Image (spheres, rainbow, N blue to C red):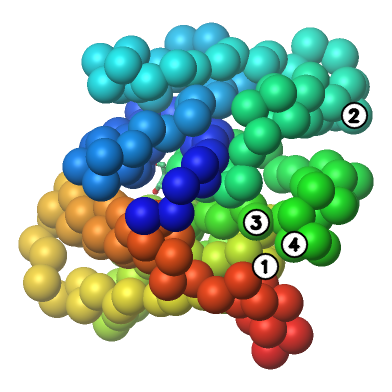
Amino acid sequence: MREGLRIAIFASGTGSNAQALIEKMQSLGGQIEFVLTDKPHAGVLERAQALATMSYVVEKKTDRAAHEQEILKLVDEHQIDWILLAGYMRLLSANFLKALADRHEGRAQVVNIHPSLLPDYPGAGSLEKAFADKVEFSGVTLHLVDEGMDTGPIIQQLPLALKEFTSFADFKAGMHRLEHQIYTEFLEKIIVGQIPTNYFKETAEC
Ligand code: GRF
């Protein structure tokens, strides 16, 4: 296990991915440094508390730059190495990502999980849209974050055949399970040091 690696999770919603990540980290003998949300009533706060994990609510009260500045302050105070987005419903600005990259040898080290096989169905409502379109396969994507909407370089994708599901609720649950799997496996790779130090440089140049 890499000593002293500090990971933050940003989430805006119910937080099932955040919970899976917190539990994985704890099973590896570590702790997620903090969970950050922009929504004061987000379900993720209860999940973090139940798992004895520190959380912050940083609402966007004024402009975007001020909001991101407040977040950067926390990231710096906690010396965060990685930010894992798990249903965080805000885009991060190029300035914010650059500020992070400046702290990490040119790599922002922000990752996102998305419930579609990107570049198909970016943005909100991707599960509903794919199900309504009766696509043969959907799936989940783990990708690096840039300033676009689900546009950063893809790290890994796992497909899921829709024929396995009879209802939208089942499909959604299956997709969540897959998200938790791919994200916790990635977290473990970070923690045990399987992500090479030049990983992002090479990935970004692909
Ligand atoms: C997940 O489907 C994630 O891929 C997307 O937002 C959803 C968050 O779900 N970005 P949860 O809050 O982790 O349950």
- Distance Cα–Cα, label 3 vs label 2: 20 Å
For marks 3 and 2, the one nearer the N-term is 2
What mark, if any, has residue 107 been given in the picture? 4
User: Which label's residue is closer to the chain start, 1 or 4?
Assistant: 4
Q: What is the number of callouts on the image?
A: 4
Question: Disc 1 marks which residue?
Answer: 152
Left or right: residue 138 compared with residue 119: left
Mark 3 vs mark 1: in front? 3
**Kind of residue at badge 2:** Ala
Direction front: furthest residue = 3
- Looking at the rendered structure, the secondary structure element under dot 2 is helix
Q: Residue at x 9, y 62 (%)?
A: 166
- Dot 3, crowdedness within 10 Å: few (<14), some or many (≥20)? some
Q: Position of residue 159 (x, y in %)?
A: 30, 77
Left or right: 97 in relation to 111: right
Q: Is residue 189 left or right of residue 56?
A: left
Task: Name the front one of labels 1 and 4.
Answer: 4
Eyeballing the image, is 182 above or below 72?
below
Q: Are the two marked residues, 4 and 3, in contact with CB atoms closer than 8 angstroms?
A: yes
* Residue located beneath label 3 in the image: 109
User: Which of the four quarters of the rendered structure image does ligand 1 lie in?
Assistant: top left
Residue depicted at 10% across the width and 72% down the height: 164
The quadrant holding residue 204 is: bottom right
